[in-house]
Image (spheres, grey):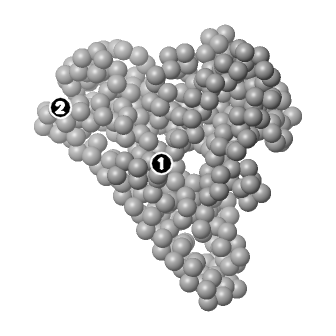
Amino acid sequence: MKRSDNLHFLKKGGCTSRVIDMVGIQERYDDDEIRLRPILKSGVFRSAFIVKHNIRPHERALVPEGLTQATKIIMPISATNLSSGGYSLFVEQLNFRETVSQFIGGHRENQTLFYQDQQRLDIIRGLPSFDPFLLREALKDYDDIDPRYFAMPQRDEELLINFSIGEMAPLVKIAFEGGVGSVAEKSRRLSDTLFRGKDGPLLDIFRNALRMDVQEYERGMFGWRGIMYYMWRVDVTSNDLRTFLHEIRKLSFRGATGQDLEMLNHCKQLIISSAGDRWKNLARIVASYRTRMAEFTNEGKPQNLRQFLLDAPELFAELGDDISAVEHVCSYWNFWRPKGQFTGLMPANEALDVLPEFCSSLAAAQIREASA
């Protein structure tokens, strides 16, 4: 296991695309139930961070050859003093089982819990991201996990609700016919009910209009929340992607040999086309939702929207893979090139490190290739 430094930056109070923050979730809700029903059961894992981590050059010997991203478990030395750091290892690393077995000891109960955790970690490491809706769908067969472990950070939840207000406007006339208040006020009430409420008259109206039974309603509402979540992520990322692609197109290289230049220009074209393909797929699913919603609100045809919402959880892996890949290259680019400082010129040696990684991050997901 490796020692990690200050862990405060990982504390989100919920699941994000790259971090499952069991430490922050336990602190946020602070009750016995949340601690008794964690995602992972082994004592060393019960209060940990699980991170989608991009493999650094010095880490490549730890994992199978060719792996560019791995699932990292970080166990704080103290959950109440994250500045003291912690210990970490990769789920994919070659000696993972042996390392953990030595760490937890040979007690039968510890080994049994670790075996159960391995099954869950196999599912988690296969996910393209840790988006809360995708994570919940992937682990839906485990009824011993407190559902609050699938919460998003409070700040993200508020931003999502604000975004969804605009999307709710067409439904206001169905849910609030004859009610008092502005469209914005009614839209916020409906959005708050969807993301923070439980069964109630507002969603009952929606359920009846879509002709869903109780079981379909539960899955349909989960699908609806997830689709809205990914639509929000697409909306947030659109400007960053536009800037990223514009600057990649303008990029030239200082100190490149002829062979380097040929490779780097090929990488540029591959990045542009792969990012475009990812974005087109996201836009296609968003457009499909809006078309079916319009058929429901404008034409009174609920069948297609009903089926779309019921099938939506099956899209979460694809949506999570596409948006996470796009977000990753944009955020890394912003880190390398702070806003306002892009000159259009990049040293060839840096470009040879950065651009191939972008190509790898944006490449078609293995999960999609396997199902093709």
Query: 331 and 320: which one is in front?
Result: 320
* Residue topped by disc 2: 302
The N terminus: image quadrant? top right
Tell me, yes or no, if residue 94 can be seen here. Answer: yes
Asked whether 326 or 60 is in front, the reply is 60
Return the residue at label 1: 321
Q: Which of 282 and 156 is in front in this view?
A: 282
Residue situated furthest right in the rendering = 84
Identified at 73% across, 41% down, the residue is: 95
Residue at position x 34%, y 14% in the image: 200
Q: Is residue 156 visible from the viewing direction of this image?
A: no
Residue 267: name its quadrant.
Answer: bottom right
- Residue 24 locus on image (x, y percent): 68, 28
Look at discs 1 and 2 and give the one toward the viewer.
1
Q: Say above or below: 190 vs 344.
A: above
User: In the figure, is residue 262 to the left or right of 295?
Assistant: right
In this picture, is 126 found above or below 234?
above
Which of pointers 1 and 2 lies earlier in the amino acid sequence? Answer: 2
Residue visible at 52% across and 45% down in the picture: 128
Residue at image point 80% right, 36% down: 87
Q: Is mark 2 on a helix, strand or loop?
A: loop
Q: Which amino acid does label 2 sit on?
A: Pro
Which image quadrant for residue 47? top right
**Horizontal and vertical percent position of residue 160:** 47, 37
